[in-house]
Image: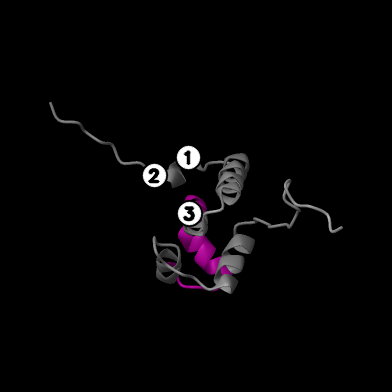
Amino acid sequence: MSEVLIPFDMAALLDSDAAISAYLSQVLEDGDTEELLRAIGHVARARGMGQVARDTGLGRESLYKAFAPGAKPRFDTVLKVLRALGIGLRAQPHATAHAPA
């Protein structure tokens, strides 16, 4: 008996702001840069890569390449995409951070 695998598309699960926020928060907490870039790509596909391209002024194909596995997009590209997606980043101290003595 052979196993049949069904295709999995993370973007299909990202159907609300709450789902997107929870997903990106978990990926950020894990601290894997490559996974974060893939996650941003999934969110961009969920919202519509064509719309993200129009909102950022970047080409749709360029965005697909920028967030493909192994890609190293420029930080300003990442920020443009996050802004177009309506996602903000904020800095806060880690729970394990120590105050200066």
> Helix, strand or loop at disc 2?
loop
Can you tell which of label 3 and label 1 is closer to the viewer? 3
> Helix, strand or loop at disc 3?
helix
Write down the quadrant of residue 2 in the picture.
Answer: top left
Residue type beneath disc 1: Leu
Q: Residue at x 58, y 48 (%)?
A: 24
25 is within the stretch colored magenta: no
Of the two numbered discs 3 and 1 on the same chain, state the one appearing first in sequence: 1
Q: Residue at x 78, y 52 (%)?
A: 98
The disc placed on residue 9 is 2
Q: Residue at x 56, y 66 (%)?
A: 78
Q: Where does the image place residue 38, in percent across and percent down from the top left?
A: 46, 56
Q: 76 or 101, which is in the foreground?
A: 101
Q: Where does the image place residue 32, in percent across and percent down from the top left?
A: 51, 54
57 is within the stretch colored magenta: yes
Of the two numbered discs 3 and 2 on the same chain, state the one appearing first in sequence: 2
Looking at the rendered image, the quarter that the C terminus falls into is bottom right
Tell me the magenta residue range. 43-60
Residue type beneath disc 2: Asp
Question: Residue at the front extreme?
Answer: 101
| Residue 95 horizontal side relative to residue 13, left or right | right
Dominant secondary structure of the residues highlighted in magenta in the image: helix
Residue type beneath disc 3: Glu
Q: Does 55 sit above or below residue 3?
A: below
Whether label 1 touches label 2, CB < 8 Å: yes
Q: CA distance from mark 3 to mark 2?
A: 15 Å
Q: 56 or 21, which is in the foreground?
A: 21
Q: Where does the image place residue 44, in percent across and percent down from the top left?
A: 50, 56
Looking at the rendered image, the quarter that the N terminus falls into is top left
